[in-house]
């Protein structure tokens, strides 16, 4: 049974930083792409960032503009999202997602497994 558990969310002031973590279990972590999505109240879920199976290839949503960095530690079965220069519009629930294959996907349908989400709130 695949499980993805996010942590690291919280309340931060605009301009601040947070580091999200996603601990994975239940399948060979290093064989699959991973991603982060987010959903704000009243808005659709959107792609934030993705990494291929190795961590050497990454891709970001247009709104990131160099502020976030996705990474993974295959030895620790963990993925990270370092978020800097946070803005109030980054406020959302952030979800970790486990990919269907080795290549990064930007759509929710590219991912088979989802965590429960962690709340990120950025105050102005």
Image: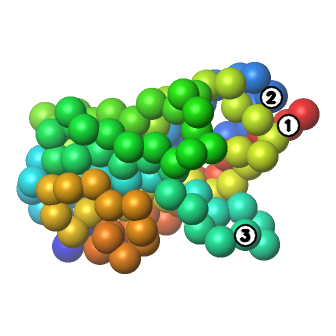
In the orientation shown, which residue stands out farthest toward the right?
124
Q: Secondary structure at mark 3?
A: loop
Number of the label disc, if any, that sits on residue 14: 2
| Way the structure is coloured | rainbow
Number of the label disc, if any, that sits on residue 43: 3
Q: Are marks 3 and 2 in contact (CB under 8 Å)?
A: no
Instruction: Please indicate whether residue 42 sits to the left or right of residue 76 in the image.
Output: right
CA–CA distance between discs 3 and 1?
A: 19 Å
Task: Give how far across and how far down residue 110 sits, in percent.
Answer: 32, 70
Q: Relative to residue 6, is residue 16 depicted above or below?
A: above
Question: Is residue 102 visible in the rendered structure shown here?
Answer: yes
Q: Which residue is mark 1?
A: 123
Task: Give how far across and how far down residue 57 sits, in percent.
Answer: 25, 38
Q: Residue at x 10, y 54 (%)?
A: 31
Q: Residue at x 65, y 71 (%)?
A: 44
Instruction: Please indicate whether residue 69 sits to the left or right of residue 45 in the image.
Output: left
Q: Observer-nearest residue: 81 or 56? A: 56
Q: Residue at x 30, y 45 (%)?
A: 51
Pair 3/1: label in front:
3
Pair 3/2: label in front:
3
Q: Earlier in the sequence, mark 2 or mark 1?
A: 2
């Amino acid at each position: 049974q695949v499980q993805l558990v996010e942590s690291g969310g919280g309340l931060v002031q605009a301009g601040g930083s947070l580091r999200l973590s996603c601990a994975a279990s239940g399948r060979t972590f290093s064989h699959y792409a991973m991603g982060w999505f987010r959903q704000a109240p009243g808005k659709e879920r959107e792609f934030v960032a993705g990494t291929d199976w190795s961590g050497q290839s990454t891709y970001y949503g247009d709104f990131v503009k160099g502020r976030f960095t996705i990474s993974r530690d295959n030895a620790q079965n963990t993925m990270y999202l370092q978020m800097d220069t946070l803005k109030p519009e980054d406020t959302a629930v952030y979800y970790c997602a486990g990919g269907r294959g080795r290549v990064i996907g930007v759509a929710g349908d590219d991912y088979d497994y989802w965590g429960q989400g962690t709340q990120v709130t950025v105050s102005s």
